[in-house]
Image (spheres, rainbow, N blue to C red):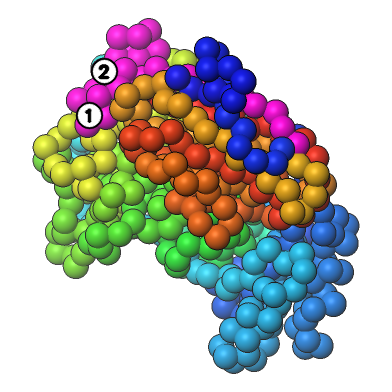
Amino acid sequence: MGMRDSNSQTRRSFLQLLGISGLVSVTGVTSATPGRAPGPKEDEILVGVAAGTADAGSMEAHVDQHIPGKAEVVHKNEDLRYVAVKFPGNENARENFIDAISKRDGIKYAEKNSTHSVSLTPSDGRFTDQYAPQQVNAPSAWDTTLGSTDVTIAVIDTGVDYTHTDLESQFASNKGRDFADDDGDPMPVGSNESHGTHVAGIASGTTDNGTGIAGISNSRIISGRVLGADGYGSTADIADGIKWATDQGADIINMSLGGGSSNSTMKNAVSYAVNNGALPICANGNAGSSSVDYPAAYSECVAVAASREGDEFVDSWRDVSGGSNYGPKTDVIAPGERVLSSVPGNDYASYSGTSMACPAASGVAALGVAADPDLTVSELRNRLKTTAVDIGEPSEKQGSGRVDAKNIVDAANGDGGGDDDDGGDGGSTSETITGSLSSWYDSASYSWDWQYSAPSELAIELDGPSSADFDLYVNEGTTATPSPSSYDYTSRSPNSQEAVTISTPDTTTALQVTVDSYSGSGSFDLTITESN
């Protein structure tokens, strides 16, 4: 079972089929042109530059030689290896530029700097009592732990009012950063910017302090303001916020936002988070659609649907058109209708949306970390799902079920349990192989024999050299070797840190994995973690 090689069938190891690399990731800072406007940036193109083609210092110059005279590089993120090019002109001109620069050597991708928005639907009135903590069984978990300020939840959203009575004790000296306005203060701008404060209160409003509301967990909060007061923001600002939050040591990154389609810059950011110890938890979206919004739809993220106060799936909001998005990418469900929480000015209000369900799930996950601090990202994601409770909805609407605080806390002692479809007991097995690739034309392929008959989740992580760009390709349910032209799953950032997560993988055949060099050479570590 597990990893095996061609020379020994008696020990668990990888079977290497082809080729042979890796290590660490790059470091760097984010810089922006002064005066770059906050919010949507529809005239910008994001360009990814492969590691090994141009080092971080020359990344700007490498792109600059391929852009027309009126275009300019206005922003860069060295760790995520992309630059933002401001491209004046019409939509056709930008499309032509994307097509042209994508064909240049060393350019990994080019894409629009798409717009994302909050996933909230305000509701009328204010409840005099909360139901969300009770619905996720938080009071029973609080008998064991209220949570811990050693656990950090990053709220990547609009700004958070860190002076609010129910939030101020959850912030340390590092309140956060404002990526929308490019400064060090994530405080909301104007009286209408309440979304991030509401989200923060659900996840971590101070419990048992004799005032206001009780959050799900007493966790540390840091605020990454990536959306403007109107609730809109760009891919670049959100990606930078994810990377920053990860570097601040966030255990959980809450993103009650969504929009646009799949894009490489955001995918690379959530991969960076997972590879560096942070779990992204994201809102499904509020269109009543059978497909989950991005970034929730990325395999690295936990996708959260919303349930009603009565504990059934929200297929429409009261007095409003639309409801919670759903689909096969849904991981869990949490209360999202008329949820009472904090808003700026030491006030409280009830809002509805997957924006509210998302921090409820984040708070439950944070209680799980407080009870079991040694959990890896993969183990936390798996435990959140395996301790969830079946509420009688189809899996595409509830995922593994409703998150449950008592179950996830009890699981730290081995006695927590959910009522989910995965049938797992929360155990996991992991193994790492070290290999090397010699140049851009080299690749290495491996086979993984299953440890569990019906694993709930599989995580494949590649840690390669900072001076090269290695990519990861995966096939399941087949004996075919994956390649850049044929694969079921892939992770292809402009560096060599890659991750693929598969829920309920197909175990009818051994898993097939290929590490491929897009550019450069060096050693790599490839780790597979299988969760029951």
- Residue picked out by circle 2: 417
Is there any visible trace of residue 358 in the rendered image?
Answer: no
| Observer-nearest of 469 and 151 | 469
Q: Quadrant of residue 332?
A: top left
Q: Quadrant of the C terminus?
A: top left
Residue 405 shown left or right of residue 148 in the figure: left
Residue at 57% from the left image edge and 52% from the top image edge: 483
| Observer-nearest of 122 and 357 | 357
Dot 1: element: loop
Q: Is residue 411 magenta?
A: yes
Q: Is there CB contact under 8 Å for labels 2 and 1?
A: no
Residue at 40% from the left image edge and 53% from the top image edge: 297
Residue at 47% from the left image edge and 46% from the top image edge: 480
Distance in Å between CA atoms under marks 2 and 1 = 9 Å
Residue 179 position in % (x across, y down)? 64, 57
- Residue picked out by circle 1: 420
Residue at 27% from the left image edge and 56% from the top image edge: 325
| Observer-nearest of 326 and 31 | 326
Is residue 189 depicted above or below 92 in this figure? above
Dot 2: element: loop
Residue 420 position in % (x across, y down)? 22, 29
Say which amino acid is labelled 2: Gly
Residue 229 position in % (x across, y down)? 49, 64
**Residue bounds of the magenta highlight:** 409-436
Residue 148 position in % (x across, y down)? 49, 20
Residue neighbourhood size for the residue with mark 1, other residues' Cα within 10 Å, grouped as few (<14), some (14–19), many (≥20): many
Residue 312 shown left or right of residue 116 in the figure: left
| Observer-nearest of 421 and 351 | 421
Say which amino acid is labelled 1: Asp
Q: Is residue 285 magenta?
A: no
Q: Quadrant of the N terminus?
A: top left
Is there any visible trace of residue 3 in the rendered image?
Answer: yes
